[in-house]
Amino acid sequence: MRTIKANKLLLIAVLAIASLTLNAAAYKSSKSSEISTRIRNAASYQNSKNTTENEIIIPEGLKPGDTIGLIAPANYTNENSNAEVEYLKSRGFNVVYGQSFYSKWYGFGGTDNVRAKDINDMFANPNIKAIFAVRGGYGGIRIVDKLNYDTIKKNPKIISGFSDNTTLLLAINEKTGLVTFQGPMADNLKNIPPVTENAFNKAFMSNESYNLLDFDDTYSIMKNGRGSGKITGGNLSLVVATLGTDHEINTDGKILFLEETNEASYRIDRMLQQLRLAGKFDKLQGIILGDFKNPKQADPTDMTIDEVFYDNFGKLNIPIIKNFKSGHVRPFIAIPIGAKAKIDTYNRQIIIEKATK
């Protein structure tokens, strides 16, 4: 009797061990499969990311008779917005207005959904050949996650603005590969200076390469050198605001453009230090410092703006141009974000390979 019981107990133990072994094997197989799937997904994501980073989509250039959509993706329009309307009409373009052009919600050109919908709808509309912002201010970062990047990529066209619009222009370029434009708005187009108009024509209406430094000679060379890569950047505050988000700026192998307005020199230094600590200067091919309007010293002991620049960039072995006429300044030179460029300070050149086609 005891032998039968012992045999039963032995059989139960064997079955239990077998079950545990099978379960462990199944679990191991499941985990192995899960890990393999994760690896494949990660590789797929990285390949997709690299494809976007390496891809350049050149939008079609403008010609008289084309329709341009006007939007207020940040603050609502004001009396200066009419200057942009009048200039574009004087050049023979038709203009249509997004709902944001007429809307107000707090300080914005309508609700977040209204402003995002304007951009998505205008990209989807084949009759609209370009999208121009009429104002900056604040608000772009509130809608950057509401844009339909698939629609944008499938319907590439010019989109232009600057200042707060940096967030949107960078996100669109990095998510889709579409060249976007740090371009003039409102006041910049009122009684338009020849420099601004010449740059406008090259950026938006030509399919040829051109030299960004040909439009105005008031820039200065901070460091000599040569480099090549896509141009990225925009307003410094908004570039820094992308850090740590899904829309973080990628500067590797690129030429970085920066501009700012009405910021104390210590605040500019702090933002540049943040970019440095985030590794955004490590693999740069060049730097273009645009207009830094009213860079006051908050305290007499603070660095001047030039001292801030030399302290942050002086040890970088790359070409650096400063006082370039782009930003909160007249005249205004449009810059294609995401376009291939070659910078050669010895020959005073920043050659844009192609901004539009």
Image (tube, grey):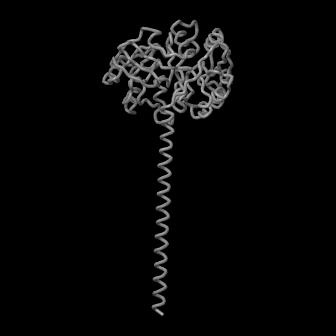
- The relative height of residue 123 versus residue 246 in the rendered view (above or below) is above
- The relative height of residue 30 versus residue 48 in the rendered view (above or below) is below
Quadrant of the image containing the C terminus? top right
Comparing 230 with 324, the one in front is 230
Q: Which residue is drawn at the image coordinates 50% and 18% (left, top)?
A: 335
Residue 207, horizontal then vertical, whole percent: 54, 17
Can residue 343 be seen from the camera position used here?
yes
275 left or right, relative to 170:
left
Can residue 167 be seen from the camera position used here?
no
Q: Which residue is drawn at the image coordinates 49% and 80% (left, top)?
A: 12
Comparing 266 with 51, the one in front is 51
Comparing 271 with 90, the one in front is 90
Q: Which residue is drawn at the image coordinates 57% and 12% (left, top)?
A: 187
Residue 113, horizontal then vertical, whole percent: 65, 32
Number of disc labels: 0
- The relative height of residue 116 versus residue 44 in the rendered view (above or below) is above
Name the image quarter holding residue 85.
top right
Residue 172, horizontal then vertical, whole percent: 55, 29
Name the image quarter holding residue 186.
top right
- List the single residue furthest toward the left: 315
Residue 212, horizontal then vertical, whole percent: 46, 14
Q: Which residue is drawn at the image coordinates 50% and 59% (left, top)?
A: 30
